[in-house]
Amino acid sequence: MSFRTSPKLSAPLEQGGPPAEYVEDVSPGSGALPPRAWYASSDARSLSLNGSWRFRLSATIDAEDDSFAEEGYEAGGWAEVTVPGHWVLQGDGAFGSPIYTNHLYPFPVDPPHVPTENPTGDHLRAFDLPSDWPSDGGAVLRFDGVESCARVWLNGTELGEFKGSRLPHEFAVGHLLKPGENVLAVRVHQWSAGSYLEDQDQWWLPGIFRDVTLLHRPAGSVGDFFVHASYDHTTGEGTLRVDSDVDGRVTVPALDIDVATGESVTVAVEPWTAETPRLYDGVLATEGERVPLRIGFRTVVLEDGLIKVNGRAVLFKGVNRHEWHPEQGRALDLETMREDVLLMKRHNLNAVRTSHYPPHPAFLDLCDEYGLWVIDECDLETHGFTEQDWRDNPVDDDRWTPALLDRAARMVERDKNHPSIVFWSLGNEAGTGRGLTAMAEWIHDRDPDRLVHYEGDWNCRDTDVYSRMYAFHDEVDKIGQRLDGGTHKRRELPFIQCEYGHAMGNGPGGLADYQELFEKYERLQGGFIWEWIDHGVKHPELGYAYGGDFGEELHDGNFVCDGLVFPDRTPSPGLVEYKKVIEPVHIEGDGANGIVRITNKQDFADLSALAFEWSCQVDGETVESGSLSVPALAPGESAEVKLPEPPVDGRGGERQWTVRALLADDTLWAAKDHVVAWGQFAAGARPLPSFPATDRPVRDGDRFTLGPAAFDARTGALLSIGDVEVSAPRLDVWRAPTDNDDGAEWQTDTRYGMLWRTLGLHRMRHRLVAVEAGDDALTVRTRVAPAAREVGLDTVYRWTSDGERLKLTVSVTPEGDWTVPLPRLGVRFGLPEADGVEWFGGGPGEAYPDTRTASMVGRWQSTVDRLQTPYLRPQENGARADVRWVELGGLRIEGDPEFWFTARRWTTEQLDAARHRTDLTPGDTVWVNLDHGQHGIGSQSCGPGPLPQYFLKAEPAEFAFVFSTTR
Ligand code: GAL
């Protein structure tokens, strides 16, 4: 099937003639074998063709003819690229550069046509067929992923062409193989009709980016097979049937199974779940081949309006995972995939949506093995058509339906034997249309034992779950209560958020509030954070590049950096927060009565894999600890456990309990003692710092002295405390707006980052009203306000001392009509030097009002440099919550009440101006913020802003700090 060639492209081109038709043909391609299960044979030979390939890049598809594919072609002068790989990430810029757009097509929307400037990479790989390569049977050449369209020749004979970048394509090549040297030629085009179906929010990265493998296919070898392994939770039995194109036997030694293919057998088994990923090793043996099987018995159904696995409703604590490596792009090696899975398991995640295409199949093996529920999503997105109200959308145009069905089939056939997959997803953000319905029908028919997902289908015409992205808390609450209306079918369905909690920059905030809803209403079966990893590209000058850094004419900036881990896979504070929010055990305490309440929040496993430990802290220091005996509670069960008598300690400081749940033994994904969950609760109130104001300010020339401090007599500015010189503390309300403060431009709700700047909160002026030396205090009165506005903050600094310590009490009274919350409220001052930092308060990582669940009260040590969270686009970061006291730069600062503490080697203004980490260079001063309040973070870069309870309202406030020197 092909469209008429448009007059534009059928006219002779300067480069020499019209483009090859297959590139703009909407059909999936020609010459490839039908899709089938992906597996590694136990005994059939294979030859990896990964490695260094000869490479020639052309600016258009017809700049060079295809004679390079002919036998004997001399490519000695060509460059080289590594396969798997993307050519734009190789050759130090000589092969073009990546392009990042969110939903806009980086070419005119003129389907199925693509630009004449269509980078085309000719690839050549000569390989020796091993001398002992079997001569019987056939051979198959498999491409696991090529973006976006490839034409293939072996030894001069054309095999065919294909599209569907993240899907496998196989060609029969046995008849073409020769002893000795063989030459594989592949022409890859960056743009094709297929690009219209691959408009995912990510970098456009052409190339042969997954493995290329030659597979021997012995006579009588396995073709395609489908493992059906269900679990009956009422009997504890599993039923296995392996359908195979080629007859054979299936053995599972641990279960004494030895049956013919196509035959069912039912035996007692341990089921597979993400919490208990029990796999049974088996073998499918046909006359010509043995294929290892990893069988997980589980049954997925939609029942009582719920997604149930093995008879129980599941709560997804998931994440959206794009494949990403900062140097390799989407060409991931096994260790990187394993790192993702390990990090997910260690952070309590139980589910992955493979946004927005099927991942490398090895990733799914890991999900089976380590235990993660998977929504496997098809390689389909046509989001750019939204710009024209979805007119000409391929998913609603029958001419494209074969391509859509081909994509669905290539996903399902390749991945159908993974127990971890519970949902097939039709794709992402492709509007609605007949093509999607056709895909859903085909999938339901081919695999009735799994459910179908697609977010764009709000009426749930084709799907088995009502799925949404970025629904606000109040709407989710309504959906939970089934008050959201909708079609009859939708009202019967469970709900998931396939994307929420947009992890761009600092955040996401509000996760705990979502989780509370998910746990409250049965209909809500959890969600998937957007997204796993920042897609920063390693860059010699910028550290990590994002959209626009390669001079793209259209781009979406750092919207591509919205992950729970940084590009190098260091967990961001967002992941640490998520781990705490979704922990599988809930630990609450009643410190006064010494009781802890433990709840098993898992869906399948009891608590026998965990050991519990209590500890008691005085002023953040552990004075006693021991193990806590907790019954092996079943899922959903709770128990109250008595804590030991609190230790006797004469110091009379602040006391608290901490209870932790640890792995009792080593597991596949973490070692014994790995902390899975924790709870903390006070055993007594915090004694607040106080002292009698016994000293009086004394005038000495142009200075005042008060206790250990000296002040400028004219301005009242603090100059030093003991021998520590300071840049005087002043009221500070500005923070470098986060991506979530700025919000996305399409957001209709108020975006405070913008309003703050418009109001001028980044350029507040401080007018001195009075400096008053009283009997027991030095009082400095000011008014803090931005130019051009009538609003202001009447600010009084009151300094007192007992001779040794110095107390600053700040009183703030807003004046005028404040219609926006404040970014922060506190004081900022400078220290000439500071490096090590110790504090008693929340830590070890950063926290903000709606991202503070994981902030654990204790004694923490760090350095000024390590306090920074290196968001790819610099922005407010690094605050520590609930700080009782902090020591740095020769000072000890105690808070009344607790405060938010931040220190950095640059000013907020410099942080605000920076575009990349590398724009930030340390200055001579360490700037310290002591905040009484911070505004919430929210998720408005693609979702709701902070909930009202996390707003920092402009209201009268009073707060104090006690300073003393430590040297
Ligand atoms: C969604 C989309 C994702 C990503 C996200 C924002 O609409 O499905 O691919 O673009 O928004 O980061």
Image (spheres, helix red, strand yellow):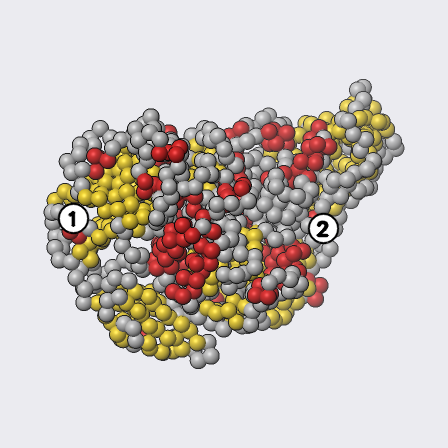
Which residue does the image show at 66% across and 51% down from the upper left?
619
Query: Looking at the picture, how far across and down is residue 289, in whole percent?
Result: 21, 63
Q: According to the image, label 1 marks what residue? A: 176
Q: Is 284 left, or right, of 670 in this rendering?
A: left
- As rendered, which of 704 and 321 lies closer to the eye? 321
User: Which comes sooner in the sequence, label 2 or label 1?
Assistant: 1
Furthest toward the right, the residue is 775
Say if 665 sits above or below 156 in the image: below
Q: Secondary structure at mark 2?
A: helix
Total marks in image: 2
- As rendered, which of 87 and 395 lies closer to the eye? 395
Q: Secondary structure at mark 1?
A: helix
Q: Is mark 1 within 8 Å of ligand 1?
A: no
- As rendered, which of 59 and 362 lies closer to the eye? 59
Query: Looking at the picture, how far across and down is residue 724, in whole percent?
Result: 67, 29
Q: Is residue 921 visible?
A: yes
Say if 743 sits above or below 295 in the image: above
Q: Is 857 left, or right, of 285 in this rendering?
A: right
Q: Residue 526 bears which disc, if any?
A: none
Q: According to the image, label 2 marks what residue? A: 949
The quarter of the picture where the C terminus appears is top right
